[in-house]
Image: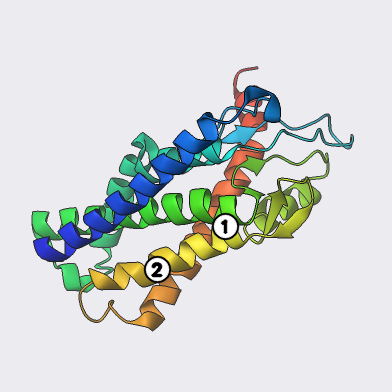
Amino acid sequence: MTAKRMLAQLRAVAMILALAAALDAQQTAAPKSAAPPSQPASAEMQPAAPRDAAPQQPRPLTVGGKLRYGMEKGFGPGSIVTSFLAAGYQQAFNHNEGFGQGAEGYFNRAGSNYGNNAIKGVVGSFALASIFHQDPRYFRSGHSSFARRLGHAVSRVLVARGDNGQAQFNISKVGGAVSAGLISTRWYQPPDDTVGRGFGRAGVSLAVSAVTNVLREFWPDIRRKLHH
């Protein structure tokens, strides 16, 4: 990963953020009576309704709310921490071997992971979610059955809640993962700079999202049991 390539990618992200800021400013300038206040964009995991009860319909995020959520997902502390943790795993097993070993290889992997997260946050959680009117947040299931809750968590990778409350194909999640996988070929080193490897990284990203959703679904229950 050369410095010139990384600077080019950062310039592209800066242009996207400038456009996002303009859209957010336009949204903020709209009359307050146009829509009810949305739920906090930073809420990563919304509370579930009583088990086996009709789930409550959350208020959709505004464009500005999706912007803030996407920035938090792509550039926030969680993105930084997971980027460095994943880099340690990748280096230990020599994944993305084109980056090499040693400190340089480790920081190249971490920077690449962070770039992938940034693209998914901007393209998926903000841009595509706004264009296709989808809510990028994860909402826990209202079921009590373990199997149904597990199925709900895994399926949210492909199924999103639309702003109208209806289930939709999760173009935000899938499109964000594919965009990150393909754009990142610009800075990966051979043999990881091919389109095929880009789609492979998108698949891994979606699989990790499925596991993360399972943790989001069950962690509150596990935490309660640990505290009693």
Q: Quadrant of the C terminus?
A: top right
Badge 1 marks a residue whose secondary structure is helix
Q: CA distance from mark 2 to mark 1?
A: 14 Å
When asked about the image quadrant of residue 184, the answer is bottom left
Residue 18 position in % (x across, y down): 34, 45
Identify the mark at residue 181; answer none if there is no mark: 2
Q: Crowding at label 2, few (<14), some or many (≥20) Cα neighbours within 10 Å?
A: many
Query: Taking the image as drawn, is residue 41 in sight?
Result: yes
User: Looking at the image, is 46 positioned above or below residue 117?
Assistant: above
Q: Earlier in the sequence, mark 2 or mark 1?
A: 1
Mark 2 touching mark 1, by CB under 8 A?
Answer: no
Badge 2 marks a residue whose secondary structure is helix
Q: Is residue 92 left or right of residue 223?
A: left
Q: Is residue 195 left or right of residue 55?
A: left
Q: Quadrant of the N terminus?
A: bottom left
Q: Is residue 170 left or right of residue 180?
A: right
Kindly identify the amino acid type of the residue bearing the numbered disc 1.
Answer: Ser
Residue found 62% across the figure and 58% down from its top: 157
Instruction: State the residue in front, 169 or 114.
Output: 169
Identify the mark at residue 172; answer none if there is no mark: 1
Q: Is residue 55 left or right of residue 194?
A: right
Kindly identify the amino acid type of the residue bearing the numbered disc 2.
Answer: Gly
